[in-house]
Amino acid sequence: MTDVPLFAAQEPVFPRRVRGTFRRLKWAIMVVTLGIYYVTPWIRWDRGPNLPDQAVLVDLANRRFYFFWIEIWPHEFYFVAGLLIMAALGLFLFTSALGRVWCGYACPQTVWTDLFFAVERRIEGDRNARIRLWNAPWDVRKWRLRLTKWAAWLSIAMATGGAWVFYFADAPTLLRDLVTLDAHPVAYATVAVLTATTFVLAGFLREQVCIYMCPWPRIQGAMMDPGTLTVGYRHWRGEPRGKGTRRRAAVAAEATGGGSARVRYGAGAGDQDTAGDRVSRSGEALGDCIDCMACVAVCPMGIDIREGQQMECITCALCIDACDDVMAKIGRPRGLIDYLALDDEPPLRPGDRVATRPMGSSAPDAPVTQATGMAATQSIDGAARPAPHALAAPAVTTATPGPRDVGDWRPKPIWKHVFRPRTIVYGVAWAAIGVALLVALFIRPEIEMIVAPIRNPTFVTLSDGTIRNAYDVRLRNKHGEARDFDLSLTAPDALALSIEGTEGRTVTVPPDATALHRVYVAARPETQTAAAGRTDLRFWVEDGISGERAHQDSIFNGRGSFDERTGNAG
């Protein structure tokens, strides 16, 4: 039995710089996400006196969450829970439609690793220079470059940790306290921990975090199906690989059955690749892949996408940019590596052997070949073999129609991949939760009241026979200024309401605070409410400035609620 180590040693990855559509998209998303993260704590928002003026603030000391004009109290945590559910459904939605697009573009690990890669490339050079430096002995130059790079990484990591703590306190004040060493030790500890984790995870572990520490690569399989668009390699078009050579027109015409056009992926009549087919020096037909390894060189995970979809792939699409650039240089159509779906593979799989004619040919007596635009066989060393494209290219068959005969086949348009039953369900659930949160946000009252009857005892009989109940009334003032609130009752009989320690029925609640008051409700002995067991009543509170009202229902316990057998009331 061969001894296989349980853990494989980390192989360093040195991605090469690449230019293209997806690389520009990643730069744009990086600038936006990092800008939001670093700048948001410094945005000011005037909420009035006695309230913080930071636009986004998690005020743990006062148990508040401020987001511009929105203020979330502890009892309103369902808003936060709803946002977390929306984030999860959004992740499911994007994964089912576009694969691990979150991991490739917006995941914090990806964003900061990409930033660290850019710094490393700026200091140490591109891929080849970094490989040479990695293998070079530790001399003065290597120490100088490494220390410079590590210092730059550490600066970014410290800014990252510092920006995080600014979300939990007033940013200008906390920054001054941090610089003057007057901040709380918890702030320094938080900055130190986040600085260390950012420095290590984004600078040294990099792809190891995505492979071993993150659970999402192992979960994503449940979110994807054959209709999911993800980064992939078109084997039928690229294989067999080889550098190849451009042969003369006569040889190319012979290899293509008398024409120079070869149908490309998803092409129909009049939509053909006229670059001519590639053949090796020995005369074997080759695919479009020249085995240049450009897709591997630019991959931040160090994988070969041509080996199929892999758990390590974060679908950053940089391999698409690299491959498209190579295809342009050799005169082949783009899309050898592209966003594609498994159910968009050509209907003829490797090994299928049916008689076909070139797609787009309208002549009924068109020459029948083994596959589209390629010779049925290639002679190699005197042996007749099926041409590779004859086994894999899309085709129009002239044989008797069967389950594999699909006519003028084309892949499904992108919108059909995006709008599928699974993605529609995710999208509807995501939108429904979002609408529910918005409705709950706009209809929530500015004042709230909680009434809790005192249970021990449930009522008290005064010397004149009056029945009195006690209640704890909690009033919540969400305004930025102190407000006077008037209490009142709605009941079948005229009941007396009094507030402990207060003359009249008006109480003052401090700004953005909660006040607890003991309230007494009394019923005269001759009233039905005093004699009955339980009577429904409603407490009302009215804002003395805005006139806004809130209410809560409760009960009044009378003499009839007393159980003589047990001696208990209520």
Image (spheres, rainbow, N blue to C red):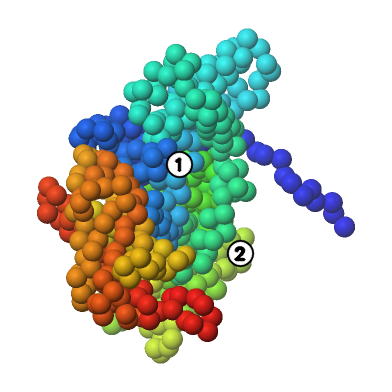
Image location of residue 547, percent across then percent down: 12, 54
Look at 26% across and 33% down and name the residue there.
50
Task: State which tag comes first along the sequence, 1 or 2.
Answer: 1
Of residues 484 and 469, the one nearer the viewer is: 469
Residues under numbered marks 1 and 2 in contact, where contact means CB atoms less than 8 Å apart: no
Image location of residue 3, percent across then percent down: 84, 51
Look at 54% across and 61% down and name the residue there.
219
Image location of residue 454, percent across then percent down: 41, 63
Image quadrant in which you'd find residue 230? bottom left
What SS does tag 1 mark? helix
Alpha carbon separation for disc pair 1 and 2? 57 Å
Name the disc covering residue 516, or none: none
Q: Hey, what amino acid is under mark 2?
A: Gly
Of residues 246 and 213, the one nearer the viewer is: 213
Image quadrant in which you'd find residue 56? top left
Rate crowding at label 1 as few (under 14), some (14 to 19) or many (20 or more) other CA atoms within 10 Å: some
Which residue does the numbered mark 1 point to in the structure image?
108
Q: Is residue 433 shown left or right of residue 125? A: left
Which residue does the numbered mark 2 point to in the structure image?
382
Image quadrant in which you'd find residue 259? bottom left
Of residues 485 and 400, the one nearer the viewer is: 485
Q: Hey, what amino acid is under mark 1?
A: Pro
